[in-house]
Image: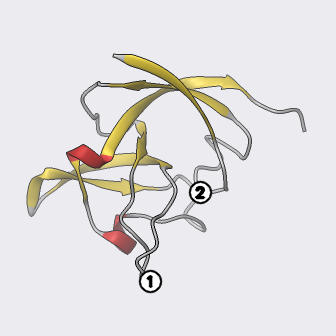
Amino acid sequence: MRPALVRVRGRSMLPTYREGDVLLVLRGLRPRAGRAHVVRLPPDAAGRPRPLAVKRLTGRDPDAPERWWVDSDNPAEGVTSFDVGSLAEADVLAVVAGLVWRPLG
């Protein structure tokens, strides 16, 4: 288990996490449904890589149990498995352990 800090960008995980929040994440742990994770999303439609993202794992893909479905906490924003399909376990990079710091305001 290797700890790291990540800063949230965007609004896809509102209300749980917001822009500027700093999260403690743990690399090297097994993914867990229901928890927020740092994930690598597939490239966009033009083939450009996307930044790493914080997403909630909602469960295993029923058609490919070695893969994970991801969702955002904000239904109005963000990329989900409905947009990009399920993710390989290798693309689930870290488990969010908790909020370390939230900017004022």
Nearest to N terminus: mark 1 or mark 2: 2
Q: Quadrant of the N terminus?
A: top left
Horizontal arrangement in the rendering, residue 63 relative to residue 14 (left or right): left
Mark seen at residue 91: none
Q: Which residue is mark 1?
A: 46
Q: Relative to 35, does residue 69 appear above or below in the rendering?
A: below
Q: Nearer the viewer, residue 38 or 75?
A: 38
Q: Position of residue 40 (x, y in %)?
A: 39, 52
Q: Position of residue 89 (x, y in %)?
A: 22, 45
Name the residue: 42% across, 64% down.
80
Q: Quadrant of the C terminus?
A: top right
How crowded pointer 2 is (Cα within 10 Å; few <14, some 14-19, many 20+) is rated as many
Disc 2 marks a residue whose amino acid type is Ser
Disc 1 marks a residue whose amino acid type is Ala
Name the residue: 61% across, 41% down.
16
Q: Which residue is mark 2?
A: 12
Identify the secondary structure beneath mark 1.
Answer: loop
Q: Relative to 90, does residue 100 appear above or below in the rendering?
A: above
Cα gap from disc 1 to disc 2, whole angstroms: 21 Å
Q: Position of residue 20 (x, y in %)?
A: 74, 41
